[in-house]
Amino acid sequence: MITTIFQAEPKSTGRGISIVFDKPVNSSPGVYRVVSKANKKVFYVGEGSNLSVRLKMLFRCYPCKNPHPCHDAYKKAYGSFPTPQQFCADFEVHVLETIGMRGRLEIEEELQEEHGSNNADFYRNWGSNLQSVQVAKPTPKPIMKPVPHRVPITSAMRKAGTWIFSKSLAEQLPEKGETIRIIFPNQERADGRIGQSTGKFLNQARYALKEFLAKYPKAKSFNVELGFEGETQTLTLGI
């Protein structure tokens, strides 16, 4: 299987962190291995239907209550949630595109078994796996707690569940066609997809959003917190 190795670098923007790769990442399905730059050991194996979106999300290390599984693994191995600077300095990613191949989930599982990764014991022992290799790390920066987004409730939301994401929220969401999971206050879930024209919008799960808002006829806005369930990005709603 032919893999491509990518290096990532964080760039500060006016609205946060942007991830830049040393070569273009295709928007294709595939399996990726997060690999230590120190000794080339595999740290994590994952998969995605859009590698460009998934890898940017992976290296951005957005802090949230329900982090990406790889970021949770990093915390188990290193004792703290990663910053984009630390993650980009410590790891590269090896990508296998799976267009025209058998199921990428099966490939992902085989690679996890081969490397022994993606389980708690593996990360508890990660320090000993690195042996005596020493790598200079950037000075850790304070991790800011995520601030929930406050979303105004519009008449279109109440009538049809139409949710056009603000620019600041859209920048942290997947690209067009990707799954997004809505988690409501009663812990019920509805899977939607990202739509995009002039901006990103909720392309499914609109009926569930409309029902949620109908329970709060006097509310003028609701909170949104980003997170993950497995590798599916979530939006947890609250009044």
Image: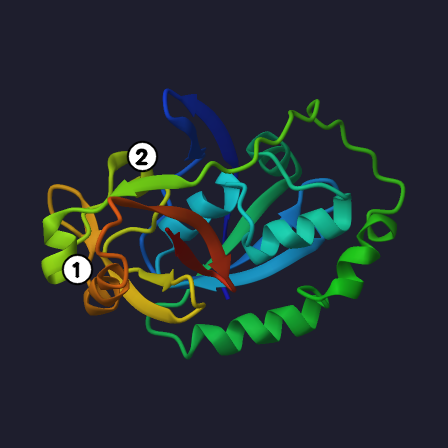
Q: State whether residue 2 appears in this view.
A: no
Pick out the residue farthest to the front: 218
Amino acid type assigned to the residue bearing label 1 in the image:
Gly
Which residue corresponds to the image point at 40% horizontal and 38% vertical from the top-left?
A: 23
Above or below, 99 against 84 in this view is: below
Q: Which mark is residue 168?
A: 2
Drawn side of residue 130 relative to residue 227, left or right = right
Which residue corresponds to the image point at 51% horizontal and 38% vertical from the top-left?
A: 146
Image quadrant of residue 138?
top right
Q: State whether residue 79 appears in this view.
A: yes
Q: Secondary structure at mark 1?
A: loop
Q: Secondary structure at mark 2?
A: helix
Q: Position of residue 32 (x, y in %)?
A: 51, 58
- Quick one: label 2 or label 1, which is nearer the N terminus? 1
Q: Position of residue 125 (x, y in %)?
A: 84, 57
Q: How many marks?
A: 2
Q: Position of residue 137 (x, y in %)?
A: 72, 28
Q: Which mark is residue 22?
A: none
